[in-house]
Amino acid sequence: HRLRYTSSSSRPCRGGSCVRLFASVLLLAISAHRAAGSPSEIAPDVVDLRSWDEAYLLAEKKVAELSVWEMSRLVRGTGWHRPFDYTPGFYVGNIAGIPGKGIPWLKMQDSSNGFRAMLESTVGTTIVWPSSLAAACTWDDEMVEQWAVALGREFRGKEANVILGPAVNVHRITRGGRNFEYLSGEDPYLGARLARAFVSGVQSQGVMAVVKHFAFNEQETNRNSQSSEIDDRTAWELYYPPFEAAADAGAGSFMCSYNKVNGTYSCSNSNLLKRDLKDKMGFRGFVMSDWGASHSTALLQGNDMDQPGLDSFYSFHNVENDRETLRAAVTRILAAMFRLRLDGQAPGCTAPMCFGSLNKNVTSAAHVDLA
């Protein structure tokens, strides 16, 4: 199955219908909110992010202290078990830290309508926000930034330091199964404005943004096998602007998608990950796979981290031989951590003993009002 992309005019959503959609979802979000215990007021100070240059200097020094085994742990996720299931007490995504070397755990959670409730006990402990598409319908980047700040505070309250978002693909398929979570709607200019606002807002709270799904993952039908056939002009004029804006805003990570691009899977596509993202867009963070989207050991092709780590592609034995490439991937991962100052945050829980943090109520009256 192939999905062919050609240049066409983009049409933003229309004002009246968008306002009605946003109002409906807003009301649903407020009605879905319930308190579970005493709400916590989570208001960390705005994080003074390091520059990328400073972060890379720290990362290069830290990498020199690590063994090959320690480096291999930083490129492969943990916390899931076969056949393909989340382990309670972990976050949706996890990278085991190395406390003795000052390297924190990466604790990742989905974000489409707020902190994803994976356990029944966590339902109602965060705000159920309007969807990203509903937020896009406001055409208000200041509001989106405020929303992202609030999301960052709730994630910090749950001791998660990575948010698996924003999703910024430009709509192409009307019945796209994930259109509701794509912040760009049908308009690449709008998507660029909002992506920049979201990344700035959430990362100001010391929570790393993961921009997804890179790239051309505009449909769910046959997503694991279809190939999006696209030329450079269409890519750069219509589908790349939101991603490029997020990279310019300093996003810590990008997530490669399930689909193929011009016949090669996204997560092993060097043209996509190295040429376009890292070289042409100047992205300085790291790339992680979508969950189960790796089809090979693709460090050399630009995929720096495999999630959730169930397969053996990024096992120690498969990454130890090309140590220069492994070291480069780990340097990118550490640089993103240091830029967000994750090394300075309280270590918090260690999975799988994170039930207390996951169950913590981080709602607030201010966030209900914002929603």
Image (cartoon, helix red, strand yellow):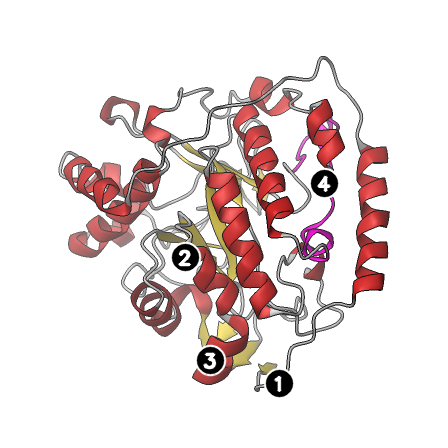
Asked whether 140 falls inside the magenta stretch, the response is: no
Q: Mark 3 points at which residue?
A: 263
Q: Residue at x 58, y 21 (%)?
A: 42
Q: Name the residue under label 1.
A: 8
Residues marked 3 and 4 touching at CB (< 8 Å):
no
Q: Residue at x 60, y 39 (%)?
A: 146
Residues marked 3 and 1 touching at CB (< 8 Å):
no
Residues marked 1 and 4 touching at CB (< 8 Å):
no
Q: Name the residue under label 2.
A: 247
Query: Residue 55, position in %: x, y?
Result: 25, 41
Nearer the viewer's eye, disc 3 or disc 1? Answer: 1
Residue 258 marker: none
Q: In which quarter of the image is residue 206?
A: top left
Q: Mark 4 points at which residue?
A: 129
Q: How far apart are marks 2 and 1 (CA)?
A: 24 Å
What's drawn in magenta, residue-wise? 116-137
> How many marks overall?
4
Q: How far apart are marks 3 and 1 (CA)?
A: 22 Å
Local secondary structure at mark 2: helix
The amino acid type of the residue labelled 3 equals: Gly
**Does residue 282 appear left or right of residue 136 in this picture?**
left
Q: How far apart are marks 4 and 2 (CA)?
A: 25 Å
The amino acid type of the residue labelled 4 equals: Trp
Q: Which of marks 1 and 4 is nearer the N terminus?
A: 1
Query: Residue 41, position in %: x, y?
Result: 62, 18
- Report whether residue 97 is seen: no
Q: How far apart are marks 1 and 4 (CA)?
A: 32 Å
Dot 2 surroundings within 10 Å: few (below 14), some, or many (20 or more)?
many
Local secondary structure at mark 1: loop
Local secondary structure at mark 3: loop
